[in-house]
Amino acid sequence: MFWNEKIETLKGKDLEQLQLKRLKWTLRQVGSVGFYQQQLKDAGIRIGEIRKLEDIRKLPFTRKQDLRDGYPFGFLAVPLSKVIRIHTTSGTTGKPTVVGYTRGDLEAWAELIARNLTMVGLKVGDIFQNMVNYGMFTGGLGFHYGAEKVGLTVIPSATGNTRRQIEMIQDFGVTAIHCTPSYAMHLSEVAEEMGVELATLRTGLFGAEPWSDAMRGELESRLGVTAFDSYGLSELFGPGVAFECPERDGLHIWHDSYLVEIIDPASGEVLGPGERGELVVTPLVKEAMPLLRYRTGDITMLLPDECPCGRAQKIARITGRSDDMLVIRGINVFPSQIEHVLLRIPEVGSQFMVYVDRVNHLDEMTIEVEINRAHFSGELADLSRIQKKVVKELRETLELRTTVKLVEPGSLPRFEGKAKRVIDRRGVV
Amino acid sequence: MEQKKYVIRQISVFSENKPGRLAAIAKALQEEEINILAFSIAEADGFGVVRALVDKPKKAYEKLSGIGFNVAFTDVIAVQMKDIPGGLYEIARILGEGKINIEYSYAYSGKEAAVLILRVDNVEAAISAIRNGGGTLLESSMFQ
Ligand SMILES: [Zn+2]
């Protein structure tokens, strides 16, 4: 199902034409932002030099820190009186980032959410419980207005009081939920404790934090839903930037509204389809807070294959943050790649630690991984075979030789919240 | 069926090569008053397996698993070794002729004679070969 079939399936020359038109509009829009006036002046670029889409590569990147430095209203391209809503994102360090929205922005954002909801099969008649924070976090109001636009019956339940949430799902016959994957897991556990079957649920929309395919399987079987991955960030409106279609093999990013580049986080060089790197986005329809080449910090890639659903090019599910990237002997390594390799080897656990050292001017990476309790045969030879298998699979994925240490089950640190699995000792004298 | 009584359950414990792990195993077994009759340590790259013949294997398994160790049972056999030159050769010859591979072995001095603990690739065939070849197997009931 399509919300706006023409625009959702726009590809090739037609898409590029629209993107270029909107890019030029965005370039005019940033003209009234002091930061960009200065940045373009410093880079010696006049807006008129940007004549085709590729010319965007001449422009410098915009970083999260730039937005923080502009606190509170340094990035607004319109008078504050035209801004009808403000959201903020909390940074782990320093000041929050402020995002402003004009009436047109809120309309454009709701349109994107409406596309996503329709894409996964939700329509008038569906009862939608929106179990995310409704405050400064963009997930609550963002989904709320998109769902109302489609005509779903919206329950703005927000977060907390899980038992009450479960009662509402039962009493109102809720068919679709939106929340973080970890809250969905908690919900399923509480429902189990209560002995409640959430029989009416069919669709689960999960986002705002990374989640694995293993978790998808678990959520689907526990909640009886089909689970869809949602991607977005407040700087680009909020959720709704990219979303899984029923194929659930990558996320459709809305190319009419976002100009996508994938770059090597270390060199800034633009990468091709199938090459993993950092997602850089130039929003094309943002009025209040236009951005140029915004570095999202999220690691993904453009998928080379066409999607059977007919929509345009997809990105892969986010597999980590560029801040976590390691450069080992010149090769970019993301801890998430290591995790993916370990997840498909049943003989070892999914917890791991990475140690990086410099030995005789060469980078050496050592990975500690736990043996899976159920796979210990008692034979040393079997352990050696498992160790070699991990080394081999890591080499195939990372294109890098590593040292693998098998450790006892339960001996590696468990992390709550952000994991700190990498210890880089190269800088230490 | 007759042969079953010669099959002995060894406990095999996964252990990282780091200080204190063997002591932790020994202490745990002592707490449960489990006797270690024989043991050996096999090491590879950063990790190893502690193999032990104990008088109460099930209790040892439960205790060690309970404190987090990764433990497995391994079937082994025990052969009485004549305390004369060529005693080891005789056992090795019998198994060799029976086309049975010795994966590892370790020995200890029992009350009457030296005892060789053997892990072989085919336990039943090894038991038959040793009995037919005139060797003396020790029954598991002697230990456990
Ligand atoms: Zn699709």
Image (cartoon, grey):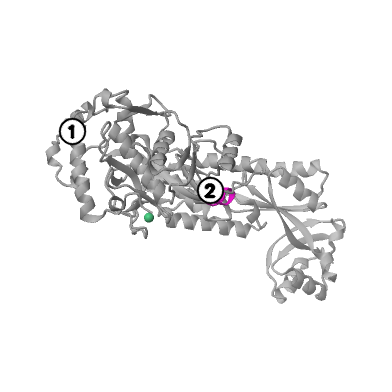
Inspect the magenta stretch and tell me whether residue A218 lies in it.
yes
Q: Chain of mark 1?
A: A
- The residue drawn where x is 79% and y is 52% is B58
Packing grade of label 1 (10 A; few <14, some 14-19, many >=20) is: some
Q: In the displayed structure, would residue A222 be above or below residue A143?
A: below
- The residue drawn where x is 57% and y is 59% is A385
Disc assigned to residue A421: none
Most frequent secondary structure within the magenta stretch: helix
Quadrant of the rendered image containing residue B125: bottom right
Disc assigned to residue A215: 2
In this picture, which residue range is highlighted in magenta?
Answer: A216-224
Secondary structure beneath disc 2? helix
Distance (Cα) linking label 1 and label 2: 44 Å
Ligand 1, what quadrant?
Answer: bottom left
Residue A384 percent across, percent down from the top left:
58, 57
Whether disc 1's CB lies below 8 Å from ligand 1 is answered no
Amino acid type assigned to the residue bearing label 1 in the image: Leu
Q: In the displayed structure, would residue A327 be above or below residue A42?
A: below
Nearer-the-camera pick, A327 or A15: A15
N-terminal of the two: label 1 or label 2? 1
Residue A111 percent across, percent down from the top left:
34, 42
- The residue drawn where x is 69% and y is 75% is B99
Residue B130 percent across, percent down from the top left:
79, 72
Nearer-the-camera pick, A285 or A401: A285
Nearer-the-camera pick, B140 or A300: A300
Packing grade of label 2 (10 A; few <14, some 14-19, many >=20) is: some
Disc assigned to residue A40: 1
Whether disc 2's CB lies below 8 Å from ligand 1 is answered no
Q: Quadrant of the N terminus of chain A?
A: bottom left
